[in-house]
Amino acid sequence: MKWFRVVGILPAAWWLSAFVLGMATGALFRRSLPAMAVTLAVCALAFFGLLRAPSSYAKPERVVQTKVMDEPPPEDSLYVSSYWIDRSGVRFTSQERALALASPCGTDETTKKYDKCSFSHGYRQITEFHPANRFWQFQWTEAGILLIPALALGGVAVRRTLRPRI
């Protein structure tokens, strides 16, 4: 799902919403350069805002890895986050875990021996992801987030353009 935003209906929704936004800002400002600047700024804000949004569309699934041989999340899933917890449930980053285990397990984090040592000391790796079967749900949700305001902006642009000037 690394191509999540470039396949399906989402590219068309982005294109249409950016076009309508540009049309509406052009109708409101009646100047090309300010209309382009506002359109670019709003599209950039929307893109970076929606980049983080899929986690709020549905609760991500969790995989708790308790030993070295456990299966990772499916390759076609949408990755959300990965972190470590200890026996008491305290959350750690990989770097914090490495510092805590430097003396009992060593410092070479790339070996299976290090991973076995980490798990034997009570650490568990948590991976959160969205499975591939949520792809269309996310596509339609994000398309709706983009197209509903675009519909309203299209109405504003048409009204502004067709209104007689005095």
Image: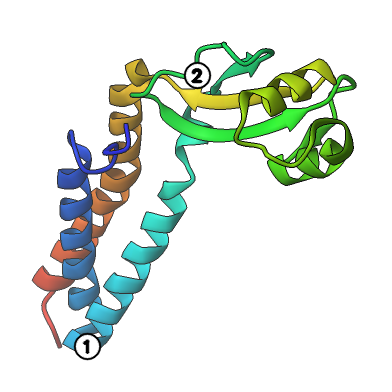
Q: Looking at the image, can residue 31 be seen?
A: no
Q: Which residue is mark 2?
A: 72
Disc 2 to disc 1: CB gap under 8 Å: no
Q: Position of residue 158 (x, y in %)?
A: 13, 63
Q: Position of residue 133 (x, y in %)?
A: 34, 15
CA separation, marks 2 and 1? 49 Å
Asked which secondary structure carries label 2, the reply is loop
Residue 152 left/right relative to 23: right
Q: Looking at the image, can residue 136 be seen?
A: yes
Mark 1: amino acid: Leu
Disc number placed over residue 9 in the picture, else none: none
Instruction: Tell me which residue sits at (19%, 57%) in the image.
Output: 154
Q: Which quadrant: the C terminus?
A: bottom left
Residue 126 left/right relative to 9: right
Visual colour scheme: rainbow
Callout 1: 10 Å neighbours few (<14), some, many (20+)?
Answer: few
- Foreground: disc 2 or disc 1: 2
Tell me: residue 145, above or below residue 118. below
Q: Which quadrant: the N terminus?
A: top left
Instruction: Tell me which residue sits at (59%, 16%) in the image.
Output: 63
Which mark is first along the chain, 1 or 2? Answer: 1
Q: Which residue is mark 1?
A: 33
Q: Quadrant of residue 117?
A: top right
The front one of 11 and 116 is 116
Tell me: residue 124, above or below residue 96. above
Q: Quadrant of residue 147?
A: top left
Instruction: Tell me which residue sits at (16%, 52%) in the image.
Output: 16
Asked which secondary structure carries label 1, the reply is helix
Q: Position of residue 4 (x, y in %)?
A: 29, 37
Mark 2: amino acid: Pro
Q: Quadrant of residue 160?
A: bottom left
Q: Position of residue 164 (x, y in %)?
A: 11, 77
